[in-house]
Image (cartoon, rainbow, N blue to C red):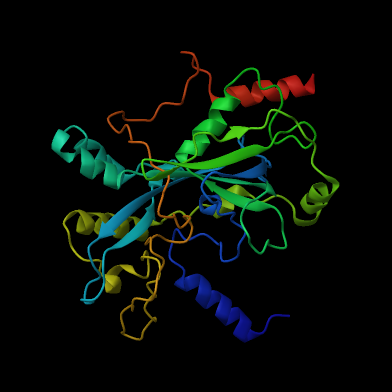
Amino acid sequence: MATLADIRAKLQAQSSKPSGEGQIGDNAIYPHWNIPENSEAVLRFLPDGDPNNTFFWTERAMIKLPFNSVKGDASSGPVQVQVPCMEMYGDACSILAEVRQWFKDKSLEDLGRKYWKKRSYVFQGFVTTSPLQEDAPENPIRRFIIGPQIFNIIKSALMDPEMEDLPTDYTRGVDFRINKTTKGGYADYSTSKWSRKTTPLSEEQHKAIETHGLHNLGDFLPKKPGEVEIKVMEEMFRASVDGEPYDAEKYSQYFRPAGLRAPMTGSGTTAQPQPAPAVKVETAEPTVSATPEPTPAPQPEQPAEQPATTNGSNSKAEDILAMIRARQQK
């Protein structure tokens, strides 16, 4: 049984964690961005543990707010705070509503891209082949934070009517091969692809699913901000655009850069910077290497983003998945 000290320690840890930070203190996330150049990692995706999710992934949308420094700390350099985009929860996002208007002015387009939401996609599955030397977690069902370039490869194959089985099928599924090269000084994953050969899960993999179960991928999205947090996000956005320093005393109990300690409640002291990773983002987002995956430019002039189409049709990935399931049932 947990002691009172254990309970207090856990509650303190939860209260000091900024909104938007995922519960990824272990090595459950496989850092595919760290594989060497000209190497390959082979993954086997699994379904979402949430039966209400049509897809075997869930989408994250975050907005990065850059600041030149931390208020009151002359030695601090630029920092970046990551906040959830409210569109991720099906709500209107006041920040994007503002930024969307900037794209009507050519001189503001670069600024608009800086503050536009950044997408990533959360998957789960097994790492069947890895060039990385790492201590594998006890639970072999890993999580994968996939960027737009790899995700578009995954999705385009699902839109192909010739794919007859779900790639996550335990018996007739296929592996996904992440290939990393370099192009223009950035990591390039354009040669990543689905395997052509179907393979069943191994007995060991089946046992892992029975033992640990499947994750509900929605659990790894940032907590939905409340009314107070939304106001703080809007205020931080204005401060960032206006070139003001990050005010830890005002904001750190809600959102803060990686490595910045939250203030002690009632102590009257402000947050003090701590050593942080080179990329100042909260840990729910992977720490990107020196060759990050490029992010496609947004298309904010459209009030709502349109689903991808194939060959001019209006087929959605959801429709294709439904078609594949229908074939399997036959």
The residue drawn where x is 30% and y is 33% is 300
Name the quadrant containing residue 256.
bottom left
Question: Is the N terminus in the top left, top right, bottom left or bottom right quadrant?
Answer: bottom right
Q: Is residue 171 left or right of residue 281?
A: right
Name the quadrant containing residue 111.
top left
- Is residue 56 at all visible to an observer of this figure? no
- Up/down of 283 relative to 47, above or below: below
Direction front: furthest residue: 38
Q: Is residue 7 left or right of residue 288?
A: right
- Up/down of 210 relative to 4, above or below: above
The residue drawn where x is 49% and y is 57% is 284
Q: Measured from the top left, where is residue 249 in percent x and y?
A: 28, 74
Q: Measured from the top left, where is residue 227 in percent x and y?
A: 36, 56
Looking at the image, which is closer to me, 186 or 110? Answer: 186
Question: Is the C terminus in the top left, top right, bottom left or bottom right quadrant?
Answer: top right
The residue drawn where x is 37% and y is 72% is 260
Q: Is residue 57 left or right of residue 60?
A: right
- Is residue 148 at all visible to an observer of this figure? yes
- Up/down of 59 relative to 36, above or below: above
Name the quadrant containing residue 6.
bottom right
Looking at the image, which is closer to me, 187 or 16? Answer: 187
